[in-house]
Image (cartoon, rainbow, N blue to C red):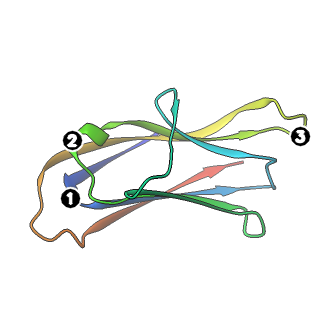
Amino acid sequence: MTDDLLMSGETMKVECYFKEKPPSVDWYRGAIPVKTDPRVTITYDEAKLYSCMEMKKCKITDEAKYRCQVEDAEGEEALEFAGFSVFVKGTVSNTALSKLVSIFIS
């Protein structure tokens, strides 16, 4: 589990790399699945064994433990996942700033 500190208004980009192709990839904020919206984009590239979640204009209410979870070949939830915690503090005047976190699932 990794932790990251963002300033309010920054963009958070989290990349998750896989050792082998998982049947499905899901992102969670705590126990709740992350949904895409105008601020949140989730991509999955099977060929590159890669998934990414990007959250723009982070705010204090975005503070949480996030995780990327995969299913095994039988379609059951895998016990393996990569997680991280996000803490959002203060404000930043330049909203073009961003943070990148890379996590790996083997």
Give the mark nearest the N terminus, 2 or 1.
Answer: 1
| Residue 2 on image: x %, y % | 43, 43
| Residue 59 on image: x %, y % | 23, 47
- Mark number, residue 60: 2
Left or right of residue 55: residue 24? right
The image shows residue 28, relative to residue 46, as above or below, that is above
Amino acid, disc 2: Ile
Task: Measure the alpha-carbon separation of dots 1 and 3.
Answer: 39 Å
| Label 3: which secondary element | loop
Q: Residue furthest top?
A: 31
Give the mark nearest the N terminus, 3 or 2.
Answer: 2
Mark 2, residues whose alpha carbon is within 10 Å: few (<14), some, or many (≥20)? some
Q: Where is mark 3, residue-wise?
A: 73
| Label 1: which secondary element | loop
Mark 1, residues whose alpha carbon is within 10 Å: few (<14), some, or many (≥20)? many
Task: Measure the alpha-carbon separation of dots 3 and 2.
Answer: 37 Å
| Residue 8 on image: x %, y % | 18, 53
Task: Measure the alpha-carbon separation of dots 2 and 1.
Answer: 9 Å
Asked if the residue under mark 2 is in contact with the one under mark 3, i.e. CB atoms within 8 Å, the reply is no
| Label 2: which secondary element | helix
Name the residue located 61 percent from the left edge and 52 percent from the top edge.
104
| Residue 84 on image: x %, y % | 45, 41
The image shows residue 65, relative to residue 17, as above or below, that is above
Viewer-closest of 78 and 39? 39
Name the residue located 30 percent from the left edge and 38 percent from the top edge.
63
Viewer-closest of 22 and 4? 22
- Mark number, residue 72: none
Amino acid, disc 3: Ala
Q: Where is mark 1, residue-wise?
A: 9
